[in-house]
Image (spheres, rainbow, N blue to C red):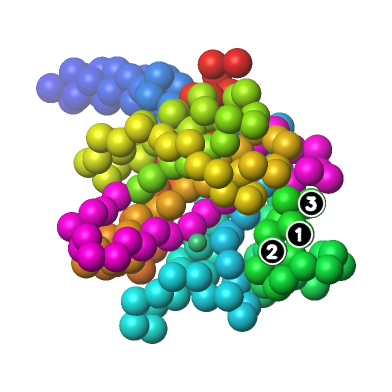
Amino acid sequence: MKKSFKFICIYCTISLVLLSTILPLIFNTNAAFSAQHSPLKDKTILIDPGHGGIDGGTSSGNILEKNINLEASLILKTELLRRGSKVIMTRDKDVSLENLCKDNDYRHRRDLKARVNIINNNNIDAYISIHVNAVNNAPYVKGPMVFYSNTNINSKTLASYVQDSLNAIAGTNRNPNVADYFLLTNAKKTGILVELGFITNNDDKNLLVNKDYLKKLSEGIAVGLEKYFESK
Ligand SMILES: [Zn+2]
């Protein structure tokens, strides 16, 4: 009895050692392994948290878009760093950027120009501008939306991968949208603007102040970026 017990133990030990070595490789559960093999490794991604400082963006009660944008962007930064990317941020605290642009223009336009300059003056592989949506008289409209400009040939492809990835998280079925936004039209790099959800929808509003949901959306954006770089 003793002998056979010992035999089983040795057999089990060997099996467990083999399983613990091989399983993370098969299922890609080991963080270091996944970072080493992510298509995002060594890519430089610029994250632009919309608004900030004097400019709160859209709001609902005391919930301000600028704070959701920054929180989601910092979580996205962590996700991208974990996958081996380099990350540049247009802002990493509660500030607006108009002071970085000396043009004779109004405040909001100077803020946007400053963001465009940071995108155009850095050697980046892609940029992601993060925002929160709002719509009047349609409280049932919800879910993430991805916007792109046709001024960059690759932006539509990136937008499609990220929108698909976010659809899977939010249970929506959207296509990405072309938009004539100042930032998208004037930035000369591949990039997209992501509206994380609608602050005018109660379900979305509750989700957007939940860090776990922002982490899910950030992972979704990272997966979309990975699929885009994989396709190239
Ligand atoms: Zn916004």
Residue at 44%, 70% in the rendered image: 58
**Whole-number angstrom distance, CA of label 2 to CA of label 3:** 12 Å
Res 31 seen here: no
- Please provide percent x and percent y for residue 163: 39, 36
Mark 2 residue type? Arg
Report if the beta carbon of the residue with label 3 is closer than 8 angstroms to ligand 1: no
Whether pointer 1 and pointer 3 mark residues with C-beta atoms closer than 8 Å, the reply is yes
Question: Considering only vertical position in the picture, is 25 above or below 143?
Answer: above
Q: Quadrant of residue 175?
A: top left
Whether pointer 2 and pointer 3 mark residues with C-beta atoms closer than 8 Å, the reply is no
Q: Earlier in the sequence, mark 1 or mark 2?
A: 2
**Whole-number angstrom distance, CA of label 1 to CA of label 3:** 5 Å
Q: What residue range appears in magenta?
A: 119-143
Q: Which residue is mark 1?
A: 114
- Please provide percent x and percent y for residue 137: 23, 65
Question: Considering only vertical position in the picture, is 186 above or below 104?
Answer: above
Q: Which residue is mark 3?
A: 117
The dot on residue 47 is none
Which structural element holds mark 3?
helix
Who is closer to the viewer here, 17 or 24? Answer: 24
Magenta run includes residue 130? yes
Residue at the far bottom in the pictured view: 62
Who is closer to the viewer here, 46 or 200? Answer: 200
The dot on residue 109 is 2
Residue at 40%, 74% in the rendered image: 59
**Whole-number angstrom distance, CA of label 1 to CA of label 2:** 9 Å
